Structure formats: structure tokens, C-alpha cells
Image: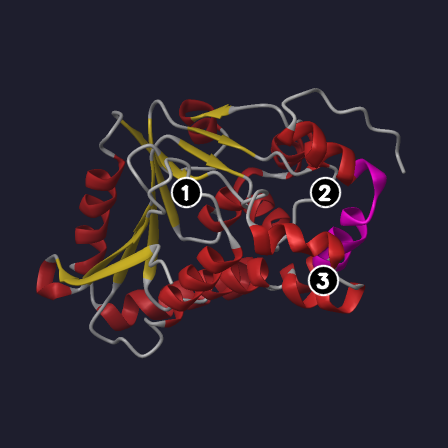
């Protein structure tokens, strides 16, 4: 099985920084089901790691992630699944973002190139995001006849507010530049192209120099307060995604994407 994720520990002050590198070597870093599983396992590998205070997640030099892999064989098999099997398979994404959000360590995303769909969902589950100035974000789910799930809507709402969240999600073809993402409060820092990882490591070193227990407890308090109602607000997003995936509009959206043409949605 191909290893898409590599973990390096023991970096920075007192060895308290770890780096998780996600790179499929395909230039786009699409999130296949197997990639989702490996990234989830990477997050969970830190559950009993008291020696690490900060985790930096980075993609390749040209892409953080292009989002869910619509061409992956396992992913495409969803259209043949019964509803029960589909619901279970669709939990791979929420399981990933929940694992990263619930990590005790401070998490920092270093984003270069593009970050699309599921890549955005993963990035907003982390504590901080740093972007190269020539990078961009995009949330294309609605343009594919789907809804944005993985509990991403409440996370984006906390960062940007309701209007910007609607703008980012509903206007599916809109590229959000790094400067716009910073203005919208979707990312915390924009740096020169190719320096997102360096800037993330600089921030990681500052965090790692702080008392580990106080940092972990503060993160837990802030997250519990900020996300207290998220499960209530988005507990149905997997089922909504499953329902949308059965629509004619979803089939049309995916066919149009793969055929490089403009979709024709009919609301059914």
C-alpha cells in the first residue's frame, strides 16, 4: 500500500515539534479514501504523545490538497452503494477532520499552491493556517451538486462569519486568493510564495517554547467554547451529502467536471 503520509518528530525547542507531510506525488494531492484513512491515523498517532506540543501539516510544494479524488476507484464506487453502505463510507471525511480538531497539540497548516474542497475542510479543522501569497482556496462542492460537509460549515462560520461563509461555499467557482482569505479571517498569515512551511515552523517554535500543559488546556477550553453547538448544527451533514449524491444534479455536476464542460443543473 502506498504511503501518502510521513511523520517527523523531535524537531524544534526540546524536540516538541512534529511535521506531518501529505504528498501523493501526483501534483494535486487529491484525497482518496485511502489518503483520508492515512491522515486520520496520523492525527490519532499523537493521542498519547506527551513529548509533542505542536504539529505542522503540510502538503506538496504545489498543492496542499485538491480535495476528494473523484477519479479514485474506491471513491467512484459510491454510486453503486446502497444507502447504508454509503452513509458508513461517507464518515471517512468527518472522522478525519474530527481527529485533527481534537488533537491536544496545537496544529498549523502550511498551504502552498491550491487548497480545494476537502483540503479546505481539513485546513479549517486545524488551529492555524499560513498561506503562500500565490496560493488560493476554493470550495467547489455545490458546483458538483453536493453540499459542504465534514462539519466544515460551523468551522468556517466561526472564522469568517455568516456572509463570508455563504460567499465561499455557494459561489463554488470563486477562487479565494491568499490575500482575500486573510482579509476574510480564513487564514492567519500570508507569506512569500514557497515560505508557508518556514513561517509555520517559526510559529510552531514560539508555541513549543510555552508550557505544554497550559497550552493544551487553553486549546481545549477555547475549542469547547467555540464548538459547543457544532454537533447540533451539523449532525445531519453526512446524511445531506448522501441525499445530494443521489440527485441528478450531482451526477451532472461530476460528469461536467470530468468532461471539462459547464454543468446544466435542473434542481432534481
Residue that numbered label 3 is attached to: 86
What is the CA distance from the residue labelled 2 to the residue labelled 3? Answer: 14 Å
- Asked if the stretch drawn in magenta spans residue 2, the answer is no
Mark 1 or mark 2: name the one nearer the start of the chain.
Answer: 1
Return the mark for residue 146.
2
- Residue 225 horizontal/vertical position (percent): 53, 62
Q: What kind of element bears circle 2?
A: loop
Residue that numbered label 1 is attached to: 29
Residue at image location 55% in from the left, 40% down from the top: 117
Main SS of the magenta segment? Answer: helix
Q: Are marks 1 and 2 in contact (CB under 8 Å)?
A: no
Query: In this rendering, would 184 be left or right of 132?
Result: right
Residue at the bottom extreme? 48
Residue at image location 34% in from the left, 72% down from the top: 45
Q: What kind of element bears circle 3?
A: helix
User: What span is in magenta?
Assistant: 237-249
Quadrant occupied by the C terminus:
top right
Q: What kind of element bears circle 1?
A: loop
Residue at image location 12% in from the left, 64% down from the top: 15
Q: Nearer the viewer, residue 222 or 260?
A: 260
State which mark lies toward you, 1 or 2.
1
- Residue 207 horizontal/vertical position (percent): 23, 56
Quadrant occupied by the N terminus:
bottom left
What is the CA distance from the residue labelled 1 to the residue labelled 3? Answer: 23 Å
Mark 1 or mark 3: name the one nearer the start of the chain.
Answer: 1
Is 56 situated above or below 192? below
Q: Nearer the viewer, residue 53 or 241?
A: 241
Is 19 situated above or below 14? above
Amino acid at each position: 500500500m502506498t504511503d501518502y503520509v510521513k511523520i517527523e518528530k523531535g524537531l524544534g525547542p526540546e524536540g516538541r515539534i512534529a511535521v506531518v507531510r501529505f504528498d501523493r506525488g501526483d501534483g494535486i494531492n487529491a484525497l482518496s479514501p485511502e489518503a483520508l484513512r492515512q491522515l486520520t491515523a496520523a492525527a490519532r498517532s499523537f493521542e498519547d504523545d506527551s513529548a509533542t506540543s505542536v504539529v505542522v501539516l503540510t502538503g506538496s510544494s504545489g498543492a496542499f490538497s485538491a480535495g476528494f479524488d473523484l477519479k479514485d476507484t474506491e471513491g467512484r464506487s459510491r454510486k453503486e452503494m446502497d444507502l447504508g453502505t454509503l452513509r458508513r463510507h461517507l464518515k471517512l471525511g468527518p472522522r478525519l477532520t474530527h481527529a485533527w480538531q481534537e488533537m491536544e497539540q496545537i496544529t498549523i497548516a502550511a498551504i502552498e499552491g491550491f487548497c480545494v474542497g476537502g483540503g479546505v475542510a481539513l485546513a479549517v479543522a486545524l488551529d492555524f493556517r499560513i498561506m503562500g501569497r500565490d496560493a488560493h482556496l476554493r470550495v467547489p462542492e455545490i458546483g458538483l451538486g453536493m453540499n459542504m460537509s465534514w462539519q466544515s460549515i460551523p468551522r468556517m462560520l466561526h472564522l469568517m462569519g455568516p456572509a463570508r461563509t455563504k460567499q465561499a461555499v455557494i459561489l463554488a467557482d470563486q477562487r479565494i486568493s491568499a490575500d482575500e482569505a486573510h482579509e476574510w479571517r480564513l487564514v492567519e498569515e500570508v507569506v512569500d510564495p514557497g515560505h508557508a512551511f518556514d513561517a509555520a515552523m517559526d510559529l510552531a517554535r514560539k508555541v513549543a517554547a510555552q508550557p505544554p500543559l497550559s497550552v493544551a488546556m487553553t486549546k481545549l477550553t477555547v475549542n469547547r467554547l467555540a464548538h459547543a453547538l457544532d454537533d447540533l448544527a451539523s449532525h445531519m451533514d453526512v446524511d445531506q451529502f448522501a441525499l445530494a449524491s443521489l440527485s441528478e444534479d450531482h451526477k451532472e455536476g461530476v460528469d461536467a467536471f470530468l468532461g471539462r464542460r459547464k454543468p446544466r443543473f435542473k434542481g432534481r
